[in-house]
Image (tube, rainbow, N blue to C red):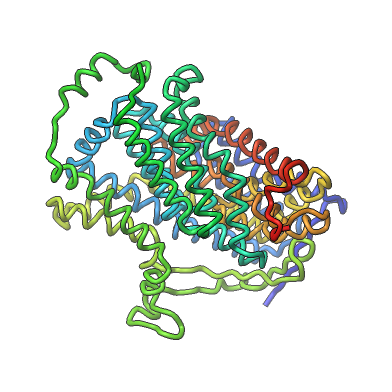
Amino acid sequence: MQTWTQIYTPVAHSLGWSALVAALPAVVLLVLLAFAHAKAHWAALTGLAVSLSIGIFVFGMPAKLALSAGLLGAAYGLFPIGWIVLGAIFIYDVAVKSGDFDIVKESIAGVGIDRRLQVLLIAFCFGGFIEGASGFGTPVAICAAMLIGLGFEPLPAAGLCLIANTAPVAFGALGIPVITLAAVTDLPVDLLSAMVGRILVLFCLVVPFWVVWVLCGRRKTMEIWPACLTVGITFGVTQYVISNYVGPSLAAVGAAVVASFSLMLLLKFWQPATTWSFAHEDQAQRVIEHSSRRIHATRRKVQAWTPWILLSVFVFAWGLTPIKNFLNGGTPAAPNFLSGISYRAITVPLLHKAVTRMPPVVSKSTAEPAIFIFNWLSATGTSLLLAGGISGLLRGLTPVTLFWVFVGTLKRIRLSLITIAAMMALGFSTRYAGMDSTMGLAFAASGVLFPFFSPLLGWLGVALTGSDTSSNVLFGGLQQTTARQLGLSPILAAASNSAGGVMGKMIDAQSIVVAGVATGQQGGEGRILRYVFLHSVVLAVLVGIVVFLIAYVFPSVISVAAK
């Protein structure tokens, strides 16, 4: 079997020049999407070609290994990422086909027709719950589709959901990013959880204001400051308390639930003085429609909300370790009847442990595993498809009708699935070639400014991989190693990787494509990227400033045990 050791300074033995060359695939992808108005799948394929070329001809990666890495990334893009997108859009299509989505819209409108409040409730609160339960782009797909159904235009529906889906990302999928970070760094999970919660508490308060400001401007935002403040404080305080005193698993889920109920309770006693709508909407007509809307019985509302209730229950259940183990065929010590059927770990030919990562990226030379996990039953996408199918049957749709709804959904997102596969292939080829590590080392070489750049490294990792978990795997070890060399807290450095990474979630290729699919903007991904890019950069820089201040001005924020 051919093996290869990563080289991190292939260009003139210079880390700076090597990092610039390593960044070219991501730069090409972003430029084609944001400025050249290229179709997303062509931009992704071009970026992939650049990545493979640099990996092979500059970094010296054998062509067979580079192609194998690309194929593994493409497979990962289709499953589980594409599988989740398919399931999320299928649920929405089932709700529309059954006619229940109109009732869902009317029940949401019962809270108020103000677009600002709808964004807080759906994009931030409900999106935070879905992110906390499942992650992987599910909240953007679900919430953006719901906003479209409520009458939002496609671009703001996509962009606002992407921006809102930041505060809970570090604790998404039942805390998996933080749990994984602890595993790869050998740092205590409770200390990492607490530190991430402390870094992000300010941003939990800021993001609700930020999202509404992007929607309607500063003056109109201040008209609903009680709602923004209520959501921000309850979300931030709850996430802080759970992450610091319970653990990472339920931090985002609990925060979203408390924030949702707090907003609903506030609206019982307070309403904004004016109602805000989009410029193209007839405000008087919306008020008339709201006042004359049908009042449905509680039972009918529950029926209409069945897909989303089942989604919440299934996604949460699928994230619980006992259920996940059962669906995967049990444990090695106690297998069940699904053993060997529902879970397959497939080693990738040629690539598995053929690429070696070297210090200082890792503490000692490490052969990189290359395993494709095909857990078709325990995958989040399966829970979404089951929720959609069961809710359709409960609402009287026949299996044949559901089949054709599924076919229609698959046909509608086929190009987007290709795009996701190509973008993940780009990310995996970059990772196995060591190009991402070269960029990470460039950040780590910033010396006294490292606490500022540490979150930006996490931001870069999520922008490249589409996952806070993957970014933590990629750069968590590098963060703590560099921190120890500089005499800084490894807990702070590792936690800042995860905290900074959440701001990269809104611009990663996977999220952009998911948002495009959910809002019917296939081919318009560049517009979505331009809508959110500056917000992502500014928020990431603000995280860097917060971490820098914690490191040098307010070290008491770091617990004594974490130092």
Q: Quadrant of the N terminus?
A: bottom right
- Asked where in the image residue 359 lies, by quadrant, the reply is bottom right
Q: What residue is at 53 percent from the left and 51 percent from the top? A: 422
Q: Quadrant of the C terminus?
A: bottom right
Image x and y of residue 3, in percent: 71, 73
Q: What residue is at 61 percent from the left and 72 percent from the top? A: 352
- Asked where in the image residue 30 lies, by quadrant, the reply is top right
Query: In the displayed structure, does residue 101 sit left or right of residue 123?
Result: left
Residue 502, placed above or below residue 263 = below
Give the residue at the far bottom of this rendering. 333
Residue 177, placed above or below residue 292 = below
Total numbered badges shown on the rendered structure: 0
Image x and y of residue 109, in percent: 26, 30
Residue nearest the observer in this picture, 21 or 199: 199
Query: In the displayed structure, does residue 305 sit left or right of residue 147?
Result: left
Residue 421 visible to an observer of this rendering: no
Residue 11, placed above or below residue 432 = above
Q: What residue is at 59 percent from the left and 30 percent from the top? A: 35
Q: What residue is at 29 percent from the left and 45 percent from the top? A: 92
Residue nearest the observer in this picture, 191 or 405: 191
Residue 32 visible to an observer of this rendering: yes
Image x and y of residue 65, in percent: 65, 66
Query: In the displayed structure, does residue 516 sit left or right of residue 286?
Result: right
Image x and y of residue 395, in percent: 15, 50
